[in-house]
Image (cartoon, rainbow, N blue to C red):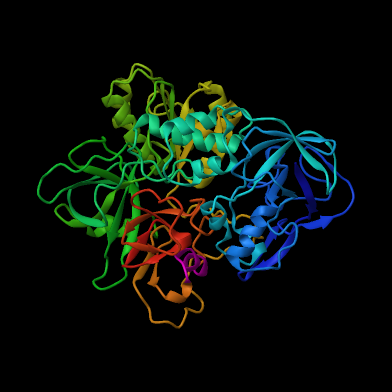
Amino acid sequence: MATLIAVNVGLPKDVAWRGGTTRTGVWKQRVTGPRMVRRLNVDGDGQGDLTGHGGEQRAVLVYQIDSYRYWQRHLRRDDFVPGQFGENFTVDGLSDDEVCIGDRYRIGSAVFEVTQPRVTCYRVGLRMGEPQMAALLVSHGRPGFYLRVLDEGLVEAGDEIVKLSSGPEEMTVAEMDALLYRPGRSRPQLERALRIPALSPGWRTSLQALLDSEIRAPGAATGNVGLTAAAGGPPPAWPGFRRLRVTRIGAESADIFSLSLASTDGSPLPPGLAGQFLTLRLRPEAGGAPLIRSYSLSGRPGAAEYRISVKQEPRGAASTHLHRHVEVGDLLEVAAPRGTFVLANGDGPVVLLSAGVGATPVLAMLHALADARSAREVWWLHGARDGDNHPFAEEVRALLARLPGGRSHISFSSPRSVDRPGIDYTAVGRLSAQQLHDLDLPRDANAYVCGPAAFMQDMTAALEARGLASARIHTETFGAVSAITPGVVPTPVRPPHLPDRPPGEAPGPTVSFARSGLSLPWHPGYGTLLELAEACDVPSRWSCRTGVCHTCETTVLSGVVEYSPEPIDAPAEGNALVCCSRPSTDLVLDM
């Protein structure tokens, strides 16, 4: 008979970590006597980061005394106490390779259901004083698991754990954990897991993404689409940068111009997907630091040449160089098309929503739909200042005319006297939630949104208010992405900069953060590329910091990395996990 050995609780607290502060509830202390277990947690317990922990599906975390003994041997330690692994229930029995998702148990007067394995994050390593602990839990098949509270009640150390029923499909916690985090998964395994009603929504979404990818192109996708949107697309058509020739330069509006690029030998270029971008490495000064910038493909996908469109920023070094100094016939260094902001296949309605130069990636999507003579309902919604600043107007009209379900709504914030209402524009003012509401957009549409950050935030909120599911709303960002630093207490944000005090070791390869416009030599003392980014205040995304969760997965525009430790599951081809890698050559990252 399995037994509850200890009940452990702890409220979130601030902990000094890596020169900052993280808020965490991973420190749990054993309590005596009966404790009430409620729908969201045990009385006296709390979680510091409700995004990754807590909630109805993750109310109670369980870990086994057998795993304690295992880690004591493996780590050669004898200082463990109940709650050491951040768990609420320390139990004798209920091993991860025996307990199944959907199993139900009675402990004391409460009833529980197993919903998912533990979510890996860095804080268990922080508590353990073992930075690699998140990866070790997965690679050794001992993650622990979460319970949902079906019937609230009192529990106490010494209570017997009575199994009430078995989960359908009888998929163990260890099997479920490996299915998401480790390679070697199969379509039958994914289908089996998704038949378990008790599986938590987060894991269900991740496994469904893996299954959908396998259905679309069996065995073709690289990387783990269940963990990150950075995976799943085709690998880049060529490594690093190659030279392409400028064949045409033309104005699209008062401040937007396009460049067409062709191969140097006249052969057709590998096709990009509708919505992808190119990255250019510009060298305005001989011997000076290069400028690395990304621009959306705005032309027809599959054309023999690429077309990119650029907004001339008043103080933009790259756009100014392209506008003033690049001529037809010049050669530019270009990385292959990349990006996951792409038009998905399907038959449902499509909303293409943009402002200013944000029209470029959705224009490529409109080209793709028009070329396919799509019967889908297609909405083209665009905001501009006036007719002089309205790019691609005639091109869009011609494309929409080829679509039987094509509809257009153009909003000018300050139309000129010569701009014709009903012809050049539809409404006066900025695109707004009210305008989207009045258009009665289909709730089952997939929406693709590109423009300034505030515009995308406003439009995303407006579409959600209209009834579109967040999973159907896709956005593209070309500046620095928003950081993901779970649990870290916010501090004033500095612009990306060279490190205040580089390590003293001999410098190595050059690392360039493309979105942040920063290049600097690598020093081994940084440890990992993630730690280098943090030393420079380059916005970064991470959670486990050990190569498990793929939150840090980043596009490698040029160069090669080496890993220590090796990731549990490899990133997509052309990407890297910056939390556990370092450069082995000069490197350009899309950060």
Residue at x-position 55% and y-position 57%? 136
Decide if residue 183 is on the left or right side of residue 400: right
Task: Specify the farthest residue to the front.
Answer: 1
Looking at the rendered image, the quarter that the N terminus falls into is top right
Q: Nearer the viewer, residue 26 or 164?
A: 164
Q: Nearer the viewer, residue 172 or 503?
A: 172
Q: Is residue 382 visible?
A: no
Q: Is residue 52 visible?
A: yes
Residue at x-position 38% and y-position 24%? 423
Magenta run includes residue 528: yes
Magenta run includes residue 520: no
- Residue 224 place in picture, x, y as percent: 43, 44
- Residue 268 place in picture, x, y as percent: 15, 41
Q: Nearer the viewer, residue 312 or 524?
A: 524
Looking at the rendered image, the quarter that the C terminus falls into is bottom left
Magenta residues, as a range?
527-536
Task: Specify the farthest residue to the right.
Answer: 33
In which quarter of the view is residue 397 placed?
A: top left
161 versus 132 height, above or below: above
In terms of secondary structure, what is the magenta stretch mainly?
helix
Decide if residue 44 is on the left or right side of residue 551: right
9 versus 565 height, above or below: above
Q: Nearer the viewer, residue 186 or 251?
A: 186
Decide if residue 159 is on the left or right side of residue 493: right
What is the count of numbered marks? 0
Decide if residue 530 is on the left or right side of residue 50: left
- Residue 89 place in picture, x, y as percent: 75, 48
- Residue 500 place in picture, x, y as percent: 51, 77
